[in-house]
Amino acid sequence: MARLNDPPQSADSYETLRRKLLRQNRDLARVNSTQSLKIRHLENECARMLSENLELRGQILQLEKEVENSKAQRIADHALEIKMKLEEQLAEWGSMLSGLGLEPPRNVEMLSAGELRNPG
């Protein structure tokens, strides 16, 4: 095998070395082209993933905001429900209080024994 530093011995060995180096150069160019295509593909994939990542982060922020709004709405709905129940109870108590003084007191002594047995 001839070395680059050694002077070639004949024209045949020089031609053989030349063909060998040309073949090696073509192989290197082919490998370089293949590797460049792979690198370009990976760069495109990386850019796509970064874009998708940003989109997903935006969706996360939007969903978190919706959850917060949903919680606040549920709390407000529950508070209104409690308010309505309290207003109903207050109205019922108000009607009970307003009717307290209207009925005449019953005098148990005036009722005869017959009225107690046969009311009406």
Image (spheres, helix red, strand yellow):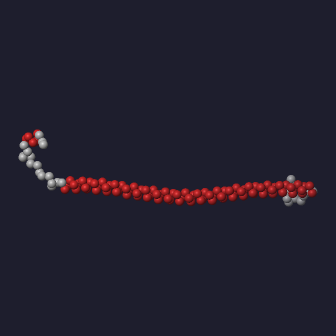
Query: Residue at 56% of width from left, 59% of height from top?
Result: 55
Residue 9 placement: quadrant: bottom right
Image location (x, y in percent) of residue 81: 34, 54
Quadrant in the picture for the C terminus: top left
Q: Residue at x 63, y 59 (%)?
A: 47
Q: Which residue is found at the position 74% from the left and 55% from the top?
A: 34
- x, y (%) of residue 3? 85, 57
Write down the quadrant of residue 46 in the picture: bottom right
- What percent of the width, then of the height, locates residue 72? 41, 58
Q: Quadrant of residue 25?
A: bottom right
In the image, residue 50 above or below residue 108: below
In the image, is 32 to the left or to the right of 22? left
Q: Is residue 119 above or below residue 94?
A: above
**Which residue is at a point 86% across and 53% down the rendered structure image?**
1
Outermost residue to the right: 10
Viewer-proximal residue, 104 or 36? Answer: 104
Circle count: 0
Where's residue 24, x and y in %? 81, 55
Question: Outermost residue toward the front?
Answer: 120
Front one among 69 and 14 = 69
